[in-house]
Image: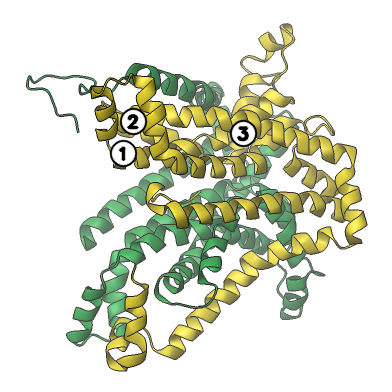
Amino acid sequence: MTTAPAHAGWRFRQPSVIPGFGLTLGFSLAYLTLIILIPLSGLIWRSAALGWTDFWALATDRRTLKALEISFGTAFIAAAVNVVFGTLVAWVLVRYRFPGRRVVDAMVDLPFALPTAVAGIALTTLYAPTGWLGKLLMPLGLKVAYTPLGIIVALVFIGLPFVVRTVQPIMEELDKEVEEAAATLGASRFQIITRVLFPGLAPAVITGFSLAFARGVGEYGSVIFIAGNLPYKSEIAPLLIVIRLEEYNYPAATAIAAIMLALSFAMLLLINLVQTWSRKRYG
Amino acid sequence: MADPEIKSYEPHHESQSAAVTESRPVRITLTTVTLVFLGIFLLLPLIIVFKEAFAKGVGAYFQSLGDADTRSAIRLTLLVAAISVPLNLVFGLSAAWAIAKFEFKGKAFLTTLIDLPFSVSPVISGLVYVLLFGAQGLLGEWLNAHGIQILFAVPGIVLATVFVTFPFVARELIPLMQEQGNGDEEAALSLGANGWQAFWYVTLPNIKWGLLYGVLLCNARAMGEFGAVSVVSGHIRGLTNTMPLHVEILYNEYNAVGAFAVASLLAGLALVTLVLKTLLEMRYGPEIAATRGH
């Protein structure tokens, strides 16, 4: 490691014998600015240019509010489902040995690798009233395809690897001796899991939840096929942006996008705070 | 690893094993629930893609893949990936060099900014370019006057793809290069190598598997991106339709075999990606940074 210079004082970077700092940082910043920062500030600039009254009117439009409610609501439920099943999947993969474990482990990343449009038409075909799963669920009175339930199914598919892949490495590092110590001191298996293991996993579970949730809120490709896309019922916010764009209603599209960005960042901030708190609380 | 250790507990000391694992029936139940859940949510969608693609036989499958619009969609997808992946590869190397090899103010903030595209909805990633280059956009009039077409054309599709795949290579390389430190490069420099030589003969061989890993994930997303590309493409058949967009068009025309035939190619790409990724993790695990996800 290069060490700090002897003389004190503010400097932008610590000296190093390695060359290329100016070139690589300069190129990275220029590229980041052109591809990400300028386009994103364009969105902020356009929504600011709307003026507060217009923005408020667009933001509180009933259809917009409903679409946002559906997007955030279904993403929340799907992320909660994924916390339960994702943690279970991680536990089984880390703790138990069964034939084909490696293949199952690799399969968990399928939603990362499978294009969302492909997932969308595949899930729709499965859960349509005539599909393999739709046929089984029909007699139970469960309609999945073309309902908000379909949105949740698609978002569970999309979000699963986020929870598994955040929880799994932490589970692998859990110290078995702590469990043994708890057992020696008379704790039951249930007590060990809830009192000893879970607190250690909580920050990872929260991170996994927030990643799955953030991804679910913005998800478009897999949802639009299965959702049915009825306004006020199963129309998600990203779809409403697309619809407004196709109507050349740029202000409305911009307003919805700005609200989505603001809400997503607020959620991430909140979850960061919860995480810091839980790290302090459970160490 | 921990495998043999766990195994040795189980058969011999039932009392001890009960302390650090669940009873056998519980283990079997949990494993079964997990496998059924993954079977329904991951395996069935994959199977249905190929089942529907071959629903009317092998002949119909290859016939729909030979369709002119389908072939032009395949060509466009390959072209877009061939431009956007190398761009993000160069950026990833450059950003990782600056961030991992040097200590400077605002480094953490820069790292956060690089991850930003992951928390933006794909639709919004496309929208920002429409607001910039569209007819009502900030640069729309100027571009129109000069006859430059970005939106509803290949440049727009490339830009949207670059936006959504922006962090992949960089976030793979940054932790890896930070872990490896500067010692090797410093040794090469003290022996008389210049900066390029140190990068080419020392750094690159050190990071090649991690780099390949990042490129693999970047490519899968670049070829499969739907939302962002959908917003900027204009859906012109044979011209601005990528494979995922073509899947949507065929599906909405009730051409199930056609839609699932194109989808099966994308699913095949996903499977190849997963296999290569798993092989890389198994063989070169320590040489790939431990960051997973996305």
Task: Answer with the quarter of the image where residue A173 lies.
Answer: bottom left
Task: Answer with the quarter of the image where residue B5 lies.
Answer: bottom left
Earlier along the polypeptide chain: callout 3 or callout 1?
A: 3
Earlier along the polypeptide chain: callout 2 or callout 1?
A: 2
Q: Quadrant of the N terminus of chain B?
A: bottom left
For mark 1, name the chain: B
User: Relative to residue A268, is residue B56 depicted above or below?
Assistant: below
User: Relative to residue B51, is residue B60 depicted above or below?
Assistant: above
Q: Residue furthest front?
A: B191
Q: Nearer the viewer, mark 3 or mark 1?
A: 1
Comparing A150 with A8, the one in front is A8
For mark 3, name the chain: B
| Chain rendered green | A
As drawn, the label of residue B178 is 1
- Dot 1 alpha-carbon crowd within 10 angstroms: few under 14, some 14 to 19, many 20 or more: some
Q: Residue at x 27, y 33 (%)?
A: B182
Dots 3 and 1: beta carbons under 8 Å? no
| Chain rendered yellow | B
Q: Position of residue A118 (x, y in %)?
A: 71, 52
Q: Which residue is mark 2?
A: B99
Amino acid of disc 1: Gln
User: Does label 2 lie on the same chain as label 3?
Assistant: yes
In this orientation, does residue A146 appear? Answer: no
- Dot 2 alpha-carbon crowd within 10 angstroms: few under 14, some 14 to 19, many 20 or more: many
Q: Residue furthest top?
A: B146
Q: Which residue is mark 3?
A: B161
Kind of element beneath mark 3: helix
Q: CA distance from mark 3 to mark 1?
A: 28 Å
For mark 2, name the chain: B
Q: Is residue B14 left or right of residue B152?
A: left
Q: Position of residue A279 (x, y in %)?
A: 25, 57
User: Does label 1 lie on the same chain as label 3?
Assistant: yes
